[in-house]
């Protein structure tokens, strides 16, 4: 029985380059955590050989955006000092400089000082501003955002939903959850309805930030109604990032019984694939600026977005 998390059909899935046919509406953001404690891939990228291998894999699967993060914002992890975060990023920059990566570089950090320092360093190395994205999970639009967009005039910025009241509390997002009684899509439509977003137009990418400041039920509802949320602001790209999220494992457990953690991880990625598949279907007719799939394994998108039958 197909999981009820999704509607739509699942055709045969195998075609590596099929996603290229939807490139005008879909992009892939490959996640690289250079952390020792991220649940999904913590400890994987602790040496240059591992980073180089992932960059090679991302190139193979036509990843458009490399999203690097040096601090885990999972609620169980302590926040990182600015010095320690920068040390990790400084080591990463050395590897990036020597690599063949030519696409966009996104930095996942809630610290403006780190973002400015990181992109200034890349600019000094000859990288152009139009390859920069600050992926800011704080959910706070403040003067530092304006400073970034002005300092790097061709860069982009990901504005995420997070209810934490200040940047230093970003990692404690589950202490600040949207009320259960709220319609999550209506709530997020209002959250993203800010004058500053209209001012900067397409340079701002919107991310509902699955798993941040939301109940389990709200996350599931948001997957089902993502196209409704996206259609509320067609002038922006939207990020869809549910890769490795714990609520997918919980969904499988509640609907299909307990299982080992390893099996649950595999089954959660199957649910992830089905969700991406649905968005690939809707992308054929969407009038919006498109969707950025934030994934740890980019092959998921290629499998999901293979050739569709003609309607």
Image: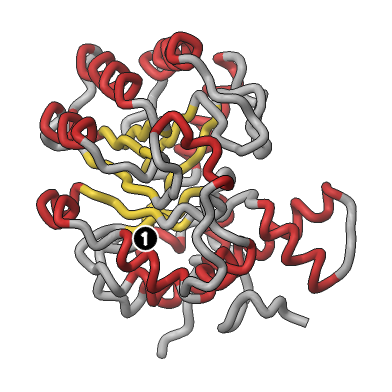
- Based on the displayed image, in which of its 4 quarters is residue 150 positioned? top left
Is residue 279 visible in this depiction of the protein? Answer: no
Q: Position of residue 93 (x, y in %)?
A: 40, 15
Which residue ends up furthest to the bottom in the rendered image? 311
Secondary element under disc 1, as helix, strand or loop, is: strand
Of residue 271 and residue 63, the one placed in the foreground of this image is 271
Count numbered badges in the picture.
Answer: 1
Instruction: Report the quarter where the C terminus lies.
Output: bottom left
Q: Residue at the location (38% across, 64% down)? A: 188
124 vs 273, left or right, is left
In front of the other: 159 or 99? 159
In front of the other: 44 or 157: 157
User: Residue 77 at x, y = what percent?
Assistant: 64, 29
Estimate the x, y position of residue 251 in percent, counting from the top left: 72, 66
Where's residue 253, x and y in %? 81, 64
Q: Quick check: 107 left or right of 309?
A: left
Whether residue 113 is situated above or below residue 207 in the rendered picture: above
User: Left or right: where does residue 188 sit relative to residue 170?
Assistant: left
């Amino acid at each position: 029985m197909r999981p009820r998390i999704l509607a739509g059909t699942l055709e045969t899935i195998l075609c590596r380059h099929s996603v290229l046919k939807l490139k005008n509406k879909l992009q892939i953001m490959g996640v690289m955590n250079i952390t020792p404690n991220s649940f999904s891939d913590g400890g994987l990228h602790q040496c240059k050989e591992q980073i180089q291998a992932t960059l090679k894999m991302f190139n193979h699967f036509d990843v458009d955006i490399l999203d690097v993060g040096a601090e885990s914002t999972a609620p169980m992890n302590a926040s990182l000092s600015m010095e320690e975060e920068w040390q990790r990023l400084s080591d990463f920059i050395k590897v990036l400089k020597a690599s063949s990566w030519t696409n966009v570089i996104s930095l996942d950090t809630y610290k403006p000082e780190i973002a400015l320092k990181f992109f200034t360093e890349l600019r000094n190395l000859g990288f152009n501003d139009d390859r920069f994205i600050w992926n800011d999970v704080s959910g706070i639009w403040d003067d530092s955002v304006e400073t970034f967009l002005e300092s790097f005039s061709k860069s982009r910025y990901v504005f995420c939903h997070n209810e934490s009241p200040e940047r230093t509390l970003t990692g404690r997002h589950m202490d600040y959850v949207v009320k259960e009684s709220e319609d999550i899509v209506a709530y997020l439509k209002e959250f993203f309805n800010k004058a500053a977003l209209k001012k900067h137009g397409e340079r701002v990418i919107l991310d509902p930030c699955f798993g941040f400041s939301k109940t389990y039920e709200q996350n599931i509802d948001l997957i089902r109604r993502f196209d409704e949320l996206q259609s509320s602001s067609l002038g922006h790209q939207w990020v869809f990032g549910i890769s490795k999220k714990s609520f997918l494992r919980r969904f499988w457990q509640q609907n299909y019984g307990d299982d080992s953690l390893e099996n649950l991880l595999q089954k959660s990625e199957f649910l992830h694939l089905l969700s991406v598949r649905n968005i690939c279907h809707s992308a054929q007719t969407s009038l919006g600026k498109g969707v950025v799939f934030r994934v740890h394994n980019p092959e998921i998108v290629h499998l999901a977005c293979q050739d569709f039958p003609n309607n």
